[in-house]
Image: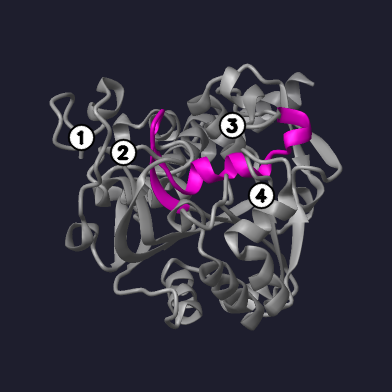
Amino acid sequence: MKHQHDRRREEERRRGLSRREAIVAGAAAAGLAGLVAVGNRYRRRTPVFVARGQRYDGPLADAIADGLVACGAKPAEFRGLKVLLKPNLVEPSRLVPHMTTHPAVIVAAAEAFRRWGASVTVGEAPGHVRDTDMALAESGVGEALRDGGLAFADLNYQPTAWRANRSRFSSLRGLHLPQSVVEADVVVSMPKLKTHHWVGLTCAMKNFYGVLPGIKYGWPKNVLHHNGIPETVADVNCLLPRALAIVDAIECMEGDGPILGTMKPMGLLLVGANLPAVDATAARIIGLAPERISYLGLINNRLGPLADDRIEQRGETWQSVASPFHVIAEPHLQMLRADAAGPATS
């Protein structure tokens, strides 16, 4: 045995490299590769597409498809996939159409994915109403889906599957996800861009509260509220499968959102494959500092970037379409404004 060991040492010596040196060199190479990978990751910029001049009677499917491609989507990859569109139908009323995602945007998104060969379902768990048929009627979405031959999944009442909460921003050990969410290859957040009287902004990430079923979490998702809105928003977004965002920012809501605010016309569509980056762009457009929004601050650089220099604006720049929203005069909301005194933000 000693003879074999001595012979191996002699071979290493002849190669000019001791075993310890070989291990150190290997570790250094691996470390360098890791640093390069991390460096590349942080050098990459995340694209977000903004389209201006949009109307509900315009060619929205083309704009959405253009936005998805601009953000890296490859149409051929969607062939045969199950795509679940998740609009915001929180508390629909024919008198307040700017509270919920417009039916024309939903149908246009479905058309874009169908062109690419995907199977599309629209699903929602309205947060404030137990009668989903009423929500579909009041929002006009039910009629639009029937005309478009689109299936609807009532996420409030579907069978669920329990999934462990890996991110643990909240104390919840796991979350119940409806069948349509579990089976989807891609879940698309389709929010209405609005202010929010508790957390300042409701957009792509907050909209995913509506994938969780009322039969498990109550109306309006009381279990999630009691475990912290920022923490549970972060947990839900970390748990979902591949997600995309298509934001209806054509007619928005400012002031006392997400229910009682007033209409703010913007004529915009936002599209992206990284929801924190989309929300950060939306926040800048409406005059808020994304790093000051609690749930965005939690996931900054974990689920996606918020810094302006880490997000690549495609289509329009956020500066060219920015128009600050009215924010109600509450200290916890006023401090979110980009022009408010406080820590520097990008």
Distance CA(mark 3)–CA(mark 2): 18 Å
Mark number displayed over residue 345: 1
Q: Residue furthest front?
A: 95
Residue for badge 2:
290
Which label was assigned to residue 241?
4
| Distance between the alpha carbons at the discs numbered 1 and 3 | 24 Å
Q: Which is nearer the N-term, disc 4 or disc 1?
A: 4
Q: Earlier in the sequence, mark 3 or mark 2?
A: 3
Which of the image's four quarters has the C terminus? top left
Give the distance between the C-alpha atoms of the residues marked 1 and 2, in whole angstroms.
8 Å
Give me the residue at 70% from left, 29% from top.
Answer: 218
Q: Residue at x 67, y 32 (%)?
A: 219
Magenta-highlighted residues? 192-217
Location of residue 147 (image quadrant): bottom right
Amino acid type assigned to the residue bearing label 2 in the image: Pro
Residue 91: horizontal and vertical position, in percent? 57, 45
> Mark 4 is on which residue type?
Pro
Q: CA distance from mark 4 to mark 3?
A: 13 Å
User: Where residue 213 sits in the image (x, y, percent)?
Assistant: 73, 38
- C-beta proximity under 8 Å, tags 1 and 2: yes
Depth check, front residue: 279 or 209: 209
* Amino acid tagged 3: Asp
Q: How far, Cα to Cα, is label 4 from label 1?
A: 30 Å
Q: Mark 1, residues whose alpha carbon is within 10 Å: few (<14), some, or many (≥20)? A: few
User: Which residue is under mark 3?
Assistant: 235
Of the two numbered discs 1 and 3 on the same chain, state the one appearing first in sequence: 3
